[in-house]
Image (cartoon, rainbow, N blue to C red):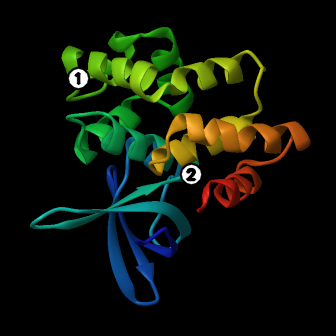
Amino acid sequence: MISFLRGSVAEALPGSIVVDVGGVGYEVLVPLSTYDALNPVRGQGIMLKTHLHIRENAQVLYGFATDEERDIFRLLVERVSGIGPSTAIAILSGLRVADFKQAVVQGDAQAIARAKGVGKKTAERVVLELKDKVGLASTWEAQQQGATSQGAADAELALVALGFKQAEVRKALAPLVKESPQAGAEELIRGALRHMSP
């Protein structure tokens, strides 16, 4: 698994960046939100959080400006039925992470359906499955109301995106957050993994 790339921009087009890492050019598909945030220029240093998606006939590398964007991408691809990488990229291209979370919390499928190539039924399925099956909407809502920290919400999102059950994640995170309410996501993730590992 390639977790991140650090190098320089060899080529940049909206939706795709070629990163030169030690003389090897990695083509990375990116959502427009990442492209806009990084504003890549040839020769500029760059670091992308990545996700390698392997299909029968291709290996595609997706890149993101932040861990949170990558976690939302993974959540969509791995936890919502019928959502593939290109649809997840389209959703992230059409909505900032905060707007996506708010749309899920409020059950606003129309906001998600505005993303290019995302139909009404797909948007409704995203809201339904993330709200009811995965249950992250309650955490995002608590975060908006200031009832939980950004670090705790990000840690929960990352661990659920990695495939852990939400109930198990919350159980592992609760004592850590109580002990250190202002702990960052990375610290909480490491602590939770120690509790959840066999």
On the rendered structure, is 156 left or right of 123?
right
- The x, y position of residue 59, in whole percent, is 22, 68
Q: Residue at x 29, y 15 (%)?
A: 124
Above or below, comparing residue 142 to residue 30 in the picture: above
Residue kind at label 2, given as amino acid type: Asp
On the rendered structure, is 85 left or right of 170?
left
Location of mark 2 (residue): 67
Toward which corner of the image does residue 2 lie, by quadrant? bottom left
- The x, y position of residue 192, in whole percent, is 69, 52
Toward which corner of the image does residue 29 lie, by quadrant? bottom left
- The x, y position of residue 9, in whole percent, is 45, 71
Q: Residue furthest front?
A: 198
Q: On the rendered image, what quadrant is the N terminus found in?
A: bottom left
Disc 2/disc 1 C-alpha distance (Å): 24 Å
Location of mark 1 (residue): 122
Is the C-beta separation of discs 2 and 1 under 8 Å? no
Q: Residue furthest bottom?
A: 23
Q: Residue at x 51, y 42 (%)?
A: 160
Residue kind at label 1, given as amino acid type: Thr
Q: Residues within 10 Å of mark 2 (few under 14, many from 20)?
A: some
- The x, y position of residue 165, in whole percent, is 49, 40
Above or below, comparing residue 96 to residue 194 in the picture: above
Residue 40 shows which numbered tag? none
